Image (spheres, grey):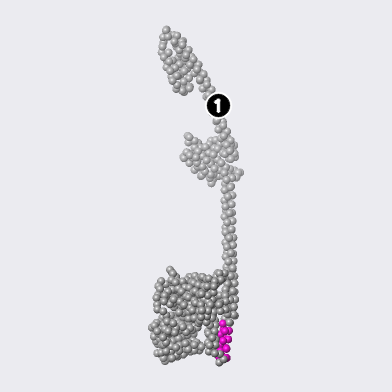
Amino acid sequence: MLCLIKKSIQALIIYVLKMKKVDKPGYQNLREKAEEVLKNKSAGTAYTQSEAEMLRLIHELEVHEIELKIQNEELLQAKEQAQRDAEKNTRLFDFAPSGYFILSKEGEIIDVNFSGRKMLGKARHSLKNSMFGFFISDDSKQIFNHFLTKSFESKITESCTVILSIENKIPVHCLLTGLADEKNENCLVNMVDISSIKQAEEKMKNLLNELTIANKEILFHNEEREKSAAELAIINKELEHSIQLNNEKNLFISILGHDLRNQFSGVLGFSELLQENIHLYTTAEIKDFINKIYTSGHKAYNLLEDILMWATTRSNKSNFNPQEMSFKDLCKKTIPILSQIADTKKIAISFNKRTDINFVADIEMLKTILRNLIYNAIKFTNINGSIKIKAKKNPGNVTISVSDDGIGIAPENLTKLFDTSQFNTTTGTAEETGTGLGLLLCKEFVEIHGGRIWVESEFGKGSVFSFTIPGKSKTIIENVVLDSDEVNRNDYLKVLIADDNELIRTVLGKMLTEYSNNILYAKSGDEAVETFRNNPDIDLIFIDFNMPGIDGYEATRIIRQISKKVIIIVETADTYSKVIEEFAGVVINDYFPKPFNKLYLDQLIRKHFNKGKSAWSA
């Protein structure tokens, strides 16, 4: 019986250990002891120990029985918790706000929650074993099939956007997110309605389109506004131009009506006095009258020349013809014209005759610039004053300056001198008047050369007007130029003057009497040619361009065929560039600008007969 009990206890302990699934040393020793007791078949002397051992084993059995009950209770609690969790998960699945589906590899619906059922519009039981693809629009089926296949293949979360097409319902845009289970048998798919997002995107797209259209309309209106502004600017510019033209017209009318009339009034008035009463005046008075006539005539001529050049630049018809020339030649061609005006105020004009600087400029424009600046200096210099003309070589250009020790310019008037929007004029030290046109013409001609013009002045002490023009790199040192009274006279010259104007022939003939006692005259081009044929020993010819019959060009061409040696000088009121144009292709030696100047004539004679003959081709 005891053995049977022992065996039962042993079997029970082993069962308990198996149920607990715990490997503890105490339980192992107990089993070893139980096995040892079963082996002992002797009940003699060991009975007491066996009985005690059996009591201990019974105690152990009771302990393990209690433990087994506790474990069973824990197992029951765990089972109940698992059931509760399962129910909770089921509720979470069933009542989730978004649709959840369990799909097979073929797309069959194995399970679906309430949200999913509602989205598909069918009863839950009727959806099970249905194909999910039946509810997908034809346009989205290929996308869905690719999504389902990829979800099983990739074993990671996949997603796609499809459109549900349910009978009698508006198509719904849905976002599908899927993940295969651990066994890769089913796929849990979450479906979210994103129709509102799509609608918002569509609205945003429409708004963007509308915004784009609005921007285009704004751009169009801006372009129209810019066009209007540009047209307005053009109108304003034309208006400003019209105002400027009107101002210039008023200026020209003022010059023609006042300044020129004053100069000619002086010329005509003194001429009339001399014509009618010359016998009543002394030699000194006659000389004074003649000086006034000369001065007024030159002023009138210079004023007319300025007006013509200003009008030419304004009509964009000016012929810009830059050439290399020297500072000394510029002064020699400009100063003699103004020296007699300066002599009336006993003003000395000087320039450096030894150091000569070459530069590139339009000769006529540069002469006009320098003439106006010198005349301006004469106007504002007191009697016995001085004017100095200087040139300075700079890198790339030359600075020419005209300085005087006159009355200077008030600071408030300095900024007005070159303002083309207005004409400023101030009375000179001898009550000389002006138009203000000269300085504006200077500014325009300097800027045509790419230079700049400026003035430095100290009121009461004098002014310095300076301007820059493109320069040449070499500086030439020459001997001092002979003054006019040192010119060697050439009374042996035989001269022909060809001009249809009797006054011009007479004036030029009188000027040439110091160089020739054999002067011939011709009134036309034909007569000039005939005279030269009859007198092939003529040394010098002064010829005009505009004459009856053949003009000066044709007469010069014929004479050149007869003689290559005769010196031919064109007398003209045109610019140097105009002479070049009129006598293109014909060899002439020089030109003599009108009105004639005695000192300039001296320089021409000296140039061609005192220093050897030279010729240049137009």
Task: State the residue in front, 491 or 553.
Answer: 491
The furthest residue to the top = 44
Q: Which residues are magenta?
A: 263-278
Q: Quadrant of residue 215?
A: bottom right
Residue 145 percent coordinates (x, y)? 50, 42
- In the depicted structure, whether residue 528 falls above or below residue 257: below
Residue 376 percent coordinates (x, y)? 53, 76
Task: State the residue in front, 358 or 571.
Answer: 358
Q: Is residue 265 magenta?
A: yes
Task: State the residue in front, 266 or 209.
Answer: 266
Residue at (59% x, 78% y) in the render: 254
- In the depicted structure, whether residue 162 falls above or below residue 421: above
Q: Quadrant of the C terminus?
A: bottom left
* Residue 288 seen in the figure: yes
The furthest residue to the right = 168
Residue 203 percent coordinates (x, y)? 59, 49
Residue 151 percent coordinates (x, y)? 49, 40
Mark 1 crowd level (few <14, some 14–19, many ≥20, 10 Å Cα): few
Provide the residue designation for mark 1: 80
Q: Amino acid at mark 1?
A: Glu
Residue at (45% x, 76% y) in the render: 351
* Residue 574 seen in the figure: no
Q: Quadrant of residue 124?
A: top right
Task: State the residue in front, 203 or 135.
Answer: 203
Q: Magenta segment, principal secondary structure?
A: helix
Query: Judging from the image, what secondary structure is the residue with disc 1 in?
Result: helix
Residue at (53% x, 88% y) in the render: 284
Q: Is residue 59 magenta?
A: no
